[in-house]
């Protein structure tokens, strides 16, 4: 899991802490805040690893029942649930089937399949408005929706509109779900925090598009742990896609320069 956490930046960590901390959880909130403060005061790899290793333990604890946590610990095994199992549990809760693969592949597949399903469920009018909010020309959006006849796939949408629009669509829908799970007030505070510190998040989507058509209706999640692991897995999935886009952008710039 460290390969997923180490590429993240300080605002990402604040977002994840905002999602996972709870007065009734057994996570080490004070310890994590202290380690994050140490990293921000002295951003060395050593300090970053100290924080991400503790964060991983807490996330894995959140995804494990108290009984199984104690059982694994008594047996001398890693007490927390594996992150791959946490991803599968989140996928099951969202009624999404993910393939066997690396944790990164599973997360990205979960994010992309959920986005495709939820976009497909929107009315044609809602699809039209969402695409327009992401900068798609009105006539182009209408033509695509009509031609698709209710069948949508992200590769086809990338071909039609480009990766920037599709990434915006993904983020729009995933942030909408995170907002439903963690609640309006906390979501607004955390989203505004990362938007203010990562300007390119804003350029990845249309202005305020992540609230459009999603609404703030409560999302029915069974079990308190899923209210934390769902946002964590989805946010890490977005960050994974973000990292890939960053690499692709660099490669595209290099090709232009050559």
Image (cartoon, grey):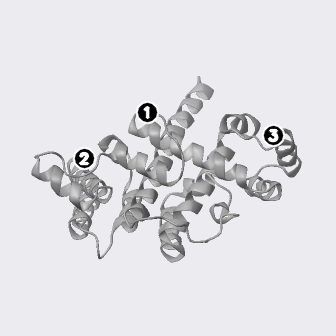
Instruction: Identify the residue at image location x=24%, y=54%.
Output: 57
For residue 70, what is the image quadrant? bottom left
Which circle, 3 or 2, is nearer the viewer? 3
Among the two numbered marks 2 and 1 on one chain, the one whose residue lies closer to the N terminus: 2
Residue 126 lies, in percent from the top left, at: 78, 59
Among the two numbered marks 3 and 2 on one chain, the one whose residue lies closer to the N terminus: 2
Q: Is residue 226 above or below residue 186?
A: above
Label 2, label 1: how far apart the Cα atoms are: 31 Å
Looking at the rendered structure, the secondary structure element under dot 2 is helix
Image quarter (top left, top right, bottom left or bottom right) of the N terminus: top left
Label 1, label 3: how far apart the Cα atoms are: 29 Å
Which circle, 1 or 3, is nearer the viewer? 1
Mark identifier at residue 45:
2
Q: Is residue 35 above or below residue 144?
A: below
Residue 130 lies, in percent from the top left, at: 74, 56
How many callouts does the rendering have? 3
Instruction: Identify the residue at image location x=83%, y=58%.
Output: 125
Instruction: Identify the residue at image location x=83%, y=49%.
Output: 137
For residue 225, what is the image quadrant? bottom left
Q: Residues within 10 Å of mark 1 (few under 14, many from 20)?
A: few
Mark identifier at residue 100:
1
Image quarter (top left, top right, bottom left or bottom right) of the C terminus: top right
Mark identifier at residue 148:
3
The reply, left or right, for residue 50 in relation to residue 118 is left
- Front one among 51 and 211: 211
Among the two numbered marks 1 and 3 on one chain, the one whose residue lies closer to the N terminus: 1
Label 3, label 2: how far apart the Cα atoms are: 48 Å
């Amino acid at each position: 899991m460290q390969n997923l956490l180490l590429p993240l930046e300080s605002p990402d960590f604040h977002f994840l802490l905002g999602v996972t901390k709870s007065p009734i959880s057994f996570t080490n909130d004070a310890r994590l805040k202290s380690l994050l403060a140490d990293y921000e005061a002295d951003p060395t790899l050593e300090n970053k690893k100290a924080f991400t290793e503790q964060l991983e333990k807490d996330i894995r604890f959140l995804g494990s029942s108290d009984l199984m946590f104690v059982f694994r610990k008594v047996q001398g095994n890693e007490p927390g649930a594996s992150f791959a199992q946490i991803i599968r549990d989140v996928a099951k809760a969202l009624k999404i089937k993910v393939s066997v693969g690396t944790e990164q592949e599973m997360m990205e597949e979960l994010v992309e399949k959920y986005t495709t399903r939820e976009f497909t469920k929107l009315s044609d009018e809602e699809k039209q408005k969402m695409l327009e909010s992401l900068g798609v020309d009105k006539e182009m959006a209408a033509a695509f929706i009509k031609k698709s006849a209710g069948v949508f796939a992200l590769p086809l949408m990338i071909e039609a509109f480009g990766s920037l629009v599709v990434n915006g669509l993904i983020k729009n829908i995933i942030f909408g779900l995170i907002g439903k799970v963690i609640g309006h007030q906390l979501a607004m505070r955390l989203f505004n925090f990362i938007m203010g510190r990562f300007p390119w998040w804003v350029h990845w989507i249309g202005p305020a598009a992540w609230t459009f058509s999603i609404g703030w209706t409560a999302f029915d999640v069974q079990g308190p742990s899923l209210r934390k692991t769902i946002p964590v897995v989805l946010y890490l999935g977005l960050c994974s896609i973000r990292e890939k886009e960053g690499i692709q952008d660099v490669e595209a710039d290099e090709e232009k320069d050559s």
